[in-house]
Amino acid sequence: MAEMTASTMSGLFSGMSAVSSGISAVSQYKKGQAERAAYDYNANITLENMKQEEISSEQKYAELMGRQRSLYAKAGVDITSGSPLLIAVSTAMQEEEEQQRIKTSGESQATMQRYAGEVAEYAGTTGAMTTFLTGLGQAGLGYELRKKGVSQLEYL
């Protein structure tokens, strides 16, 4: 078996460095894509949970207003004027406020999750580019050193 010269080993290391940086770059890119997909999935779950919470809130207030009307009717109170009407309006306003709070909270959380996904995707892409370019730079350095008759092992 022939012995490897320092120049041959340097070339081998340069090639391995370029291949390794390419593999690492693809891995970082795919990781960023996967993280974004996970954040988007979580945002969709958050929005679905928000819708379910809105439905529960609607049901809760519908039951409350039904009990109020029933109790007023049982007591023979006219619910179309005075305090009973004011209480019904107040209850309806509370329901609307709760619905808005649920919606705002759910949409804000989903937006933040989607943003975090975008950041993860960007980080994966920039990390991939940095890794790949660094690897190419190292391979180019090895090539230039070989041209001058210096091995990367000697250079380091």
Image: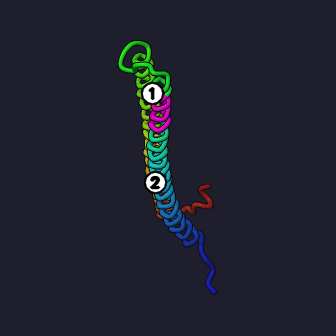
Q: Toward the viewer: 151 or 29? A: 29
Q: Which residue is mark 2?
A: 37
Question: Residue 27, labelled with which disc?
Answer: none
Q: Is residue 76 visible?
A: yes
Q: Which residue is mark 1?
A: 69
Does 65 appear in magenta?
A: yes
Q: Which mark is nearer the camera, 1 or 2?
A: 1
Furthest toward the bottom, the residue is 1
Residue 64: give x, y in percent of width and height.
Answer: 49, 31
Residue bounds of the magenta highlight? 58-70
Residue found 41% across the figure and 25% down from its top:
92
Residue count near mark 1 (Cα–Cα under 10 Å), binned few <14, some 14–19, many ≥20 = some
Residue 41: give x, y in percent of width and height.
Answer: 47, 52
Kind of residue at disc 2? Ala
Above-or-below relation of 136 to 42: below
Kind of residue at disc 1? Arg
Circles 1 and 2: CB atoms closer than 8 Å: no
Q: Which secondary structure is most common in the magenta stretch?
A: helix
Q: Toward the viewer: 75 or 12? A: 75
Q: Quadrant of residue 111?
A: top left
Q: Toward the viewer: 149 or 121? A: 121
Q: The residue tagged with tag 1: helix, strand or loop?
A: helix
Q: CA distance from mark 1 to mark 2?
A: 48 Å
Q: Is residue 130 visible?
A: no
Above-or-below relation of 132 to 49: below
Locate the C terminus and report the quarter of the image it occupies.
bottom right
Above-or-below relation of 95 to 53: above
